[in-house]
Amino acid sequence: MKHTTNYTNTFIEVADDCPVSQAETPPEKKIKTLAELQYEQIMKNPYRYTSDDIIFECYALKNDIPESEKQQARIQFFSKGQPCLRSSPLSKRYGFGTHHNDEGKVAIFPVESKEYQKFLNDPTVKKVKAMRSKKI
């Protein structure tokens, strides 16, 4: 069975315990963090990749998987369940909502933006909250 993290026509809202009221760009570190990798991929390519594409590509970059081995590694990676973008630091810590369009392709929007509000107020878009950082 192949697992997937993809959503369609869904908006992931920032977590209830997100510490920022305005979106922040993840800070640059010597070794890129997951937040940085996801941010770069999605910001540079809005609505180009699915959640699965982004989650696997970040995994491949962090684990130095060569291009020639990516196809097999991806099959292996998704042979078990993986955390979806609801657990992404972009929505939990940095204040970005994630929109998945009808094709499952994603883009991110700052919590303070007009687009973010538009998705929240659109009854045709399914809404889910990002996962909280802390247990209640």
Image (cartoon, helix red, strand yellow):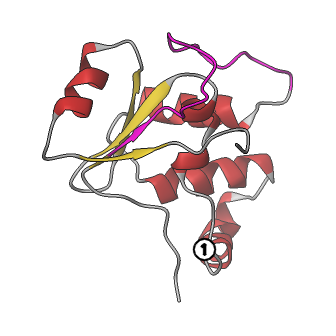
Q: Give coordinates of residue 75: x percent, y percent.
A: 60, 77
Give the residue at x 60% y 41%: 88
- Mark 1 closeness class: few <14, some 14–19, many ≥20 residues within 10 Å: some
Measuring 32% from the left and 40% from the top, which residue is drawn there?
47
Q: Is residue 18 rendered to the left or right of residue 12?
A: right
| Helix, strand or loop at mark 1 | loop
Residue carrying label 1: 78
Q: Quadrant of the C terminus?
A: top right
- Relative to 67, 63 lies left or right: right
- Compared across the picture, whether 124 is left or right of 53 comes to left
Residue 19, quarter of the rendered image: top right
In which quadrant of the rendered view does residue 115 lie?
Answer: top left
User: Which of 86/136 is in front?
Assistant: 136
Q: Residue at x 25, y 48 (%)?
A: 101
Q: Nearer the viewer, residue 17 or 30?
A: 17
Nearer to me, 131 or 42? 131
- Magenta region, residue range: 11-30
